[in-house]
Amino acid sequence: MILISHIRQFIFCPRILYFYTFCDIKPLYPEYVSLGTQYHNRQNELFKSRKFLKFKLPIIKVYNNLYLQDLSMSGIADLVIECKDEIIVAEYKNQNKPILSTGAKMQLIAYSILASKYLNKPFSKIMLICSNNLKFKIFDITNDDLIKFDKVINSIKKMIDQEIFPHSNASIAACIQCEFKNYCDDRE
Ligand code: SF4
């Protein structure tokens, strides 16, 4: 079973998933993690009064922190927007610009696949919500994105099956902000 939150970490650096899966390490998280938690908590509070009219979508229902699972993946989606003919999964991100990383996109595709099964409606878009006042951007999911998603999932399964400590191409900048920076002894 793949935890969907691990998909983004695997893309950031495959060793992070290795450490979480095979090592009993309790890492010290950098400050931005607690700031992100505070941002999410604020959005959870605001959810109780929001109507999401700003999205201008034919919304039927919006689900907050929806737990999703099938035989291969599980996780909690920040927001699942059920529209008349489709579902759109959204993620809250504590940043000013609506920039979606590859890791975040792959993670949102994973939630979309599960939410689509759960609500029995198709998906073709994902949404990033950032900053204040429901600033948002919708992104199309392309066929190339889906092909890339399958490759990432296969790579994760292979690493977990083989239990081999993976090579990493993470940059020095990535390692500096990583919670496992003291555990990779081939890094600066
Ligand atoms: S310190 Fe660098 S190489 Fe090691 S897990 Fe973190 S990002 Fe990957």
Image (cartoon, rainbow, N blue to C red):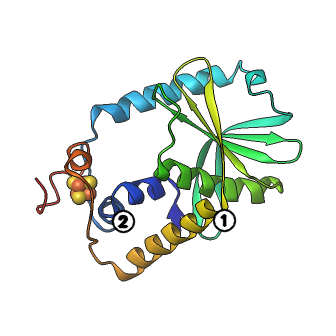
How far across and down, in percent of the image, does residue 137 sit? 63, 33
Which amino acid type corresponds to the residue marked 2 in the rendered image? Thr
Q: Quick check: which quadrant has ligand 1?
A: bottom left
Confirm whether residue 152 shows in the render: yes
Quadrant assignment, res 165: bottom left
Which amino acid type corresponds to the residue marked 1 in the rendered image? Asp
Confirm whether residue 25 shows in the render: no
Mark 1: give few (<14), some (14-19) or many (20+) Cα within 10 Å.
some
Number of numbered discs on residues:
2
Q: Earlier in the sequence, mark 1 or mark 2?
A: 2
How far across and down, in percent of the image, does residue 112 sit? 68, 53
How far across and down, in percent of the image, does residue 166 sit? 28, 71
How far across and down, in percent of the image, does residue 79 sit? 66, 38
Instruction: Indicate the secondary structure of the residue bearing disc 2.
Output: helix
Q: Residue furthest bottom?
A: 162
Q: Residue at 70%, 47% (x, y): give it.
A: 125
Instruction: Indicate the secondary structure of the residue bearing disc 1.
Output: loop
- Residue tagged by mark 2? 21
Q: Which mark is residue 70?
A: 1
Q: Residue at 52%, 71% (x, y): give it.
A: 151
Disc 1 C-beta below 8 A from ligand 1: no
Q: Residue at 51%, 65% (x, y): give it.
A: 2
* On screen, residue 131 above or below 6: above
